[in-house]
Amino acid sequence: MFLTTTENIPGKSYDIIGVAMGSTIQSKHLGKDIGAGLRNIVGGEVKAYVEMMDEARDIATQRMIQNAQQMGADAIVSLRYSTSAVMASAAEVMAYGTAVKFK
């Protein structure tokens, strides 16, 4: 599956199939959350949350790709990510874009 954040794929013509989406909600266990709270006091990168968000983006992207494949898409253009906090220490990541079929 070809993914791009651009609106067009140079040299390719395609038909738009629809919107492809995938999402997940991730959280860290209490031990990592306490460590992150301590990091908040002294400053610096909170590696546990960086890992959590990386994992969440990967999961959301794979679910979006599966959704596009179910529609018969060859590619996803205008790929975007959205995040939101759904509760303390938990975040939703959504991946979405336009599913297209090459002509």
Image: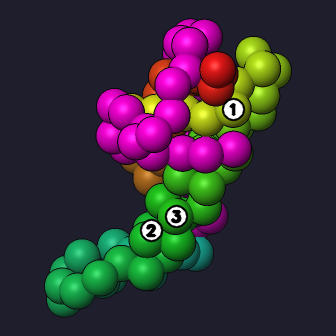
Categorize mark 1 by other alpha carbons within 10 Å: few (<14), some (14-19), many (20+): some
Label 3 neighbour load within 10 Å: few <14, some 14-19, many 20+: few
Task: Please indicate whether residue 94 sits to the left or right of residue 22 in the image.
Answer: left
Q: Quadrant of the N terminus?
A: top right
Q: To which quarter of the image does residue 70 belong? A: top right
Name, please, the residue furthest toward the front: 11
Q: Disc 3 marks which amino acid?
A: Asp
Going from N to C along the chain, the mark reached first, 3 or 2, is: 2
Marks 3 and 1: CB-CB under 8 Å?
no
Query: Which mark, residue 98?
Result: none
- From the image, tell me which residue sits under label 1: 74
Residue 7 position in % (x across, y down): 34, 31
Figure quadrant of residue 86: top left
Residue mark closest to the camera, 3 vs 1:
1
Q: Residue 49 carries which label?
A: 2
Gap between marks 3 and 1, in whole Å?
Answer: 25 Å
Left or right of 54 on screen, residue 61: right
Confirm whether residue 43 shows in the render: yes
Q: In what quadrant of the picture does the C terminus appear?
A: top right
Residue 51, placed above or below residue 98: below
Are circles 1 and 2 on residues that touch, CB within 8 Å?
A: no
Give the label on residue 54, or none.
3
- Kindly report the distance in space between the C-alpha atoms of the residues bearing marks 1 and 2: 33 Å
Amino acid identity at mark 1: Asp
Question: Which amino acid type corresponds to the residue marked 2 in the rendered image?
Answer: Tyr
- Labels 1 and 2: the sequence-earlier one: 2
Magenta residues span 1-30
CB atoms at circles 3 and 2 under 8 Å apart?
no
Whether 38 is among the magenta residues is no
Which mark sits nearer the N-terminus, 3 or 1? 3
